[in-house]
Structure formats: structure tokens, C-alpha cells
Amino acid sequence: MGFAEYYRAFPTYTDIHSEEYRRRLEELEPLLIKYMPRRGRVLDLACGVGGFSFLLEDHGFDVVGLDVSEEMIAKAKEYARKRASKVEFIQGDAREIPFEDNTFDYVLFIDSLVHFEPLELNKVFKEVRRVLKPEGKFIIYFTDLRELLPRLKDGLVVGQEYWISKIIPDREEKTVVIEFMSEKDSFRVRFNIWGKTAVELLANLYFAQEVAEKVGNYSYFIIYRPK
Ligand code: SAM
């Protein structure tokens, strides 16, 4: 059970040329550009294969991408080589960010909450505040799984080959195991369930909210400054 199969099955997060990945870039680009008026140093936290790092580099930012997965970082470096990109990709943990205090003008955290339990996300937020400059911004984008979950149904087609075959929330609805099935295989992934309220409560320990925009039906783009 795990994310490795999930990322192998869906190009949404792993193939920057896929329609699904490009749709995410196109959806967020206008918001990022609108709310990142000053150029500066950016940490793309849990950067995956680096599509958002490249996007910001193309807009003149100096970008570092950090991800815990060796596979994701290897793919990001491969894309960087092909594009002659100067983005620096580093394998590392968002819970212990390997940078000095007050290093970044922006920290970007996109589509990654499902990986973190509450105590872990608390560590991530604390680390983000530490590495942000006092006037820096923390930009987070996530899908409210608490809102989305009741709309997911067995049999729902996801991507080109898979459908959801089981949805098993734990008793407290902190996590959900989703089983995906195709003609050739099936696998299960456990997602941490984060809703907007819980994210805000945790973030408010370290940050003050400046902007919150709803994107589509279930996603939020929020900008924080350090407290
Ligand atoms: N932000 C990228 C994007 O939008 O394309 C990647 C999103 S992907 C859904 C979530 C990423 O979080 C994966 O690449 C995974 O390896 C990474 N991740 C999970 N736990 C992490 C941790 N503790 N530290 C850093 N990255 C982590």
C-alpha cells in the first residue's frame, strides 16, 4: 500500500508534459504571478518532479526544489538537465528543512498535505516559518479532502485507466484508504484527510493569513506571512 504505485499510475504529479499536470500549472500560474510581485528566492517544498519550480524560474525567480523522494528528485533533475534549468533540486524532508533561518522570500507548498499526519504537518509549518524571511510569504494550495470525500464514490473513474473500487475512512476520519483498480492491477493508498478549517487552525499558530482564494469546487490557495 502506498504512494509509489499512486504516482506511477497517475501522470498528474509525475509527468510535466501530461495534460493533467499542465492543467494544474495553468490553473495556478495566474494566482502565483498575481501574489508574488517581488522576485526573490523560492523554496518549492515537496516539489515532486519540479513543474512549479520551472514555472517560477521562467518568471525570474531563484528556485530551490526539495522533496523526500529520490525518484521524484531524480526525475526533476532530468527535466532540469533537458531544459538547461538552474533550479537546484535537493532530496530532503519538509519536517527538517536543510536550510538556515531567514533564507527564503517565498515557500511554496502545493498539493502535498495528504502525506502528513497532524504532528508532522505541525513540524513542517514550524520549519517553514523558520526558513522564511520575516517579510516572506508562505503559499499553500490544497484540495479540501474533507469536503471532497463524501462526493467520491465506488466506481468513479480516475484518470485514463483507473476507477475507485473501495473507500475506507478510519473511524475518526483522519485518514482514508482508497483502492484504485484498473484492468491490469489494483492498489491502495492511505491519504491524510485535511480540511480547510484544520489547515487554518494549524497554520494560525505560526502565520497570519493574507489571502485565501477558492479554486474550483474543493481547493484553496492561501497566502500567509510569518507571525
Ligand atoms: N508539489 C508538487 C506538485 O504539485 O507537483 C508535488 C506534489 S506530490 C502530490 C506530493 C509530494 O510530496 C511528493 O513528491 C512526495 O514525495 C512529497 N513528500 C511527501 N512527504 C514528504 C516529506 N516529508 N518531505 C518532503 N517531501 C515530501
Image (tube, helix red, strand yellow):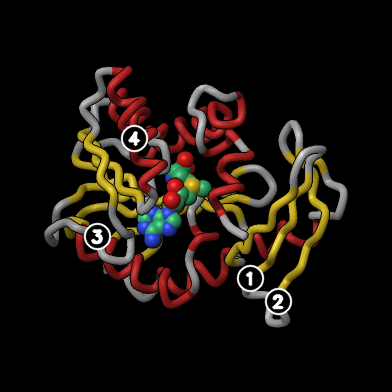
Name above or below for residue 161 compared with residue 84. Answer: below
Q: Is mark 4 on a helix, strand or loop?
A: helix
The residue singled out by tag 3 in the image is 97
Counting from the top left corner in percent of width and height, residue 183 is at 82, 38
The residue singled out by tag 4 in the image is 53
Sequence-earlier tag: 4 or 3:
4
Asked whether the beta carbons under mark 4 and mark 2 sit within 8 Å of each other, the answer is no
Sequence-earlier tag: 1 or 4:
4
Counting from the top left corner in percent of width and height, residue 75 is at 39, 33
Residue 175: mark: 1
Asked whether the beta carbons under mark 1 and mark 4 sit within 8 Å of each other, the answer is no
Residue at the extreme front: 184
Q: Distance between the residues labelled 4 and 2?
A: 35 Å
Asked whether the beta carbons under mark 3 and mark 1 sit within 8 Å of each other, the answer is no
Q: In the picture provided, is 67 more to the left or to the right than 12?
A: left
- Front-most of residues 158 and 212: 158
The residue singled out by tag 2 in the image is 170
Asked whether the beta carbons under mark 1 and mark 2 sit within 8 Å of each other, the answer is yes
Is residue 125 visible to the viewer in this orientation of the structure?
A: yes
Q: Please name the residue shown 50% across and 59% down the image.
A: 113
**Quadrant of res 192:** bottom right
**Quadrant of res 131:** bottom left
Disc 1 crowd, CA 10 A, few/some/many (<14, 14-19, 20+): some
Q: Is mark 3 on a helix, strand or loop?
A: loop
Name above or below for residue 157 compared with residue 135. Answer: above
The tally of labels here is: 4
Q: How far apart are marks 3 and 2 (CA)?
A: 30 Å
Quadrant into which the C terminus falls: bottom left
**Quadrant of res 185:** top right
* Mark closer to the observer (4, 2): 2
